Amino acid sequence: MSDLKRAHNFNPGPGVLPLEVLQEAQSELLNFKGTGMSVMEISHRSKEFEGVIQTAEADLRELLGIPANYKVMFLQGGATLQFAMLPMNLRPAGASADYIVTGSWSKTAVKEAKKLGAVHIAANTEADGFNCIPANLDLDPKAAYLHFTSNETIHGVEYFTEPTPPAGVPLVCDTSSDFISRPIDVSKYALLYAGAQKNAGPSGVTIVIIRDDMLARVPENLPVMLDYKTLAESGSLHNTPPSFAIYMVGLVFKWAKKQGGLAAVEKNNRVKADLVYKAIDESGGFYRGHAKPEARSLMNIPFRLPSEELEDTFAKEAKKENLIGLKGHRSVGGMRASVYNAMDLAGTQELVRFMRDFQKKNG
Amino acid sequence: MSDLKRAHNFNPGPGVLPLEVLQEAQSELLNFKGTGMSVMEISHRSKEFEGVIQTAEADLRELLGIPANYKVMFLQGGATLQFAMLPMNLRPAGASADYIVTGSWSKTAVKEAKKLGAVHIAANTEADGFNCIPANLDLDPKAAYLHFTSNETIHGVEYFTEPTPPAGVPLVCDTSSDFISRPIDVSKYALLYAGAQKNAGPSGVTIVIIRDDMLARVPENLPVMLDYKTLAESGSLHNTPPSFAIYMVGLVFKWAKKQGGLAAVEKNNRVKADLVYKAIDESGGFYRGHAKPEARSLMNIPFRLPSEELEDTFAKEAKKENLIGLKGHRSVGGMRASVYNAMDLAGTQELVRFMRDFQKKNG
């Protein structure tokens, strides 16, 4: 392994994982805790796997300060399946749910929710090119819930203060791309969900945190794999869970604790994001950030160059210098630097150095 | 790694994986194909991951002889989610589907299908304790499809010749626990599905093979993650797939090809299963197999001992001798030896040696 040259990995997800997490997984891949089996080969009903999933949950509870009246689930299907499960479970027949649309992902959440019932749009920033957090909300006081996307991975806009729903309306959040990137007050939420493959681990597992009172809303007779009540009450073990992905998120939670918890993680994330935004702001317009300054994501930093040709050259030359995954989403073009928890300061500094050099040569 | 003592792993799933597959995954876990990234860290839209998923599909097509007019999907949620997706997609509103019930898993499939519409039971062997394949079927010539479970993991009964539906009725099979354990004629099926965590890889990925004409049945406006049409047409890449699990099944498919393909795999499986059944049959009633001889599974071999006390002792002493995972399912008790593709002859011989020794001491 001495010849390992790690890429500086700015992929939007699946993305960079902590090197020491990968090393630990590698070292015990053939023999998990002396069992003579890989963690992939042990029964999900064994005491060894119970240790894996219970420790992962306990560490996540500690990291996020999850109150005791919340359940934690490790599910499958990504945030995209949650877009459907959420209204199936928490929007009673005939009721409407409020959605705030701030980018591609919240727009897709609305599309899925509309297939199954009524949606009311509390705000939509599409006319502004999804570059901001809406100042005003048109809220339905009888909404089944208020849904928002705390960080839009494609447009790079992030909520730093959660919206306030009317009294009695549960707050629901897709936190896929800023999950465990900074402390939040879980008690303000009725439900949080996140695909793991940004900050928390590999793809293939989705974390759902649900307040107990929401489970009373789950209708009878849902397919069991779409039923929050069954899934929560079985401790994510109704059927065979995605064991290896759960094992990996457990290692990542432990790593985040070792960094000093989410306050320390946020501090690092702010230093990294500030470096990149500073390089954009000091470029005299050569680099143009997408999001308005007050809505700038700490996780995903989309930016444009003066021409598409220069953007292509930027991506190619960056790759030659081991800076990977910088092309923007195919739906919007341009560049995007994703600086998740596991992106280190050195990688970020290397990106900023490259941005300045590239501008000197091409500006 | 020189001190690695591999367990003889008879777990019913997640279960034993080929050692060389685990070793390959381990060796490149930090650096996939020279990318400087783990396969868990690369984008699912990258050419490297395209290589992973396309090679996995091509190898599976070769192994099973999948005709060109079938799509292969790598999904999430296990067979249990397929229990619901299948009727959602392929049973038109108002129509009924035929189900053959030969054990716990087909019984659960019925339960889920009934939540969403009409089911007709073509046969049910529960009165026989789920120890056989039904001789006669009561088939509905207008059924939306005929569903059967080719191998019942808990009861250890296996279909070696698929049932014949009435003309025009599509045949659908849950093949989770005998998937790629022997050749089958895919052209007889409209749809096959299998959770990977028996013969094909780790948990967290479900393989669905669907004949193209079935996609015309998929109703409009299904949630996108439950919609076979969208999932098939996107090449399993509508959203982020379970990348690492797909990578692992790809390695297992390659390994199965190296064994000589499924004819050779079946030959090994028959040798192993015969050894265990012989030990049961020659025990003079000390060991009692569950399934009738003609329905005996090559994959899962449930058996009883003269008392529950002896069964407990058997499991404990087996474990001391590094024979793992031999307790029967909690719903039926007794013992169960799962001898999947990756269980080697040496492990099986060791089990048989232990069974004979145990009987000598306790018989």
Image (cartoon, coloured by chain):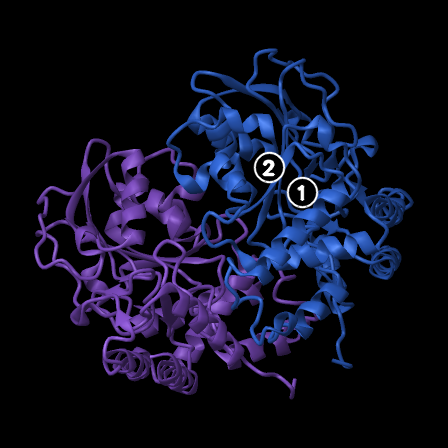
Chain colours: A purple, B blue
The reply to whether callout 1 and callout 2 are in contact (CB within 8 Å) is: yes
In the image: residue B356, left or right of residue A291? right
Q: Chain of mark 1?
A: B
Location of residue A16 in the rendering, given as x and y in whole percent from the top left corner: 47, 73
Q: Are marks 1 and 2 on the same chain?
A: yes
Location of residue A359 in the rendering, given as x and y in whole percent from the top left corner: 35, 81
Q: Dot 1: few (<14), some (14–19), or many (≥20) neighbours within 10 Å?
A: many
Q: What amino acid does circle 1 point to?
A: Thr
Separation (CA) of disc 1 from disc 2: 8 Å
Q: Is residue A10 visible?
A: no
In the image: residue A307, left or right of residue A315? left
- Between A173 and B297, the residue placed more toward the observer is A173
Location of residue A312 in the rendering, given as x and y in whole percent from the top left corner: 44, 67
View extreme (right): residue: B282
Residue at the spot 42% in from the left edge and 66% down from the top edge:
A327
Q: Helix, strand, or loop for circle 1?
A: loop
- Between A155 and A303, the residue placed more toward the observer is A303
In the image: residue A170, left or right of residue A40? left
Residue A101 position (above or below residue A317): above
Q: Quadrant of residue B61?
A: top right
State the residue position of label 1: B153
Q: Chain of mark 2?
A: B
Q: Is residue A15 visible?
A: yes
- Between B271 and A192, the residue placed more toward the observer is A192
State the residue position of label 2: B105
Q: Dot 2: few (<14), some (14–19), or many (≥20) neighbours within 10 Å?
A: many
In the image: residue B217, left or right of residue A233? right
Q: Quadrant of the N terminus of chain B?
A: bottom right
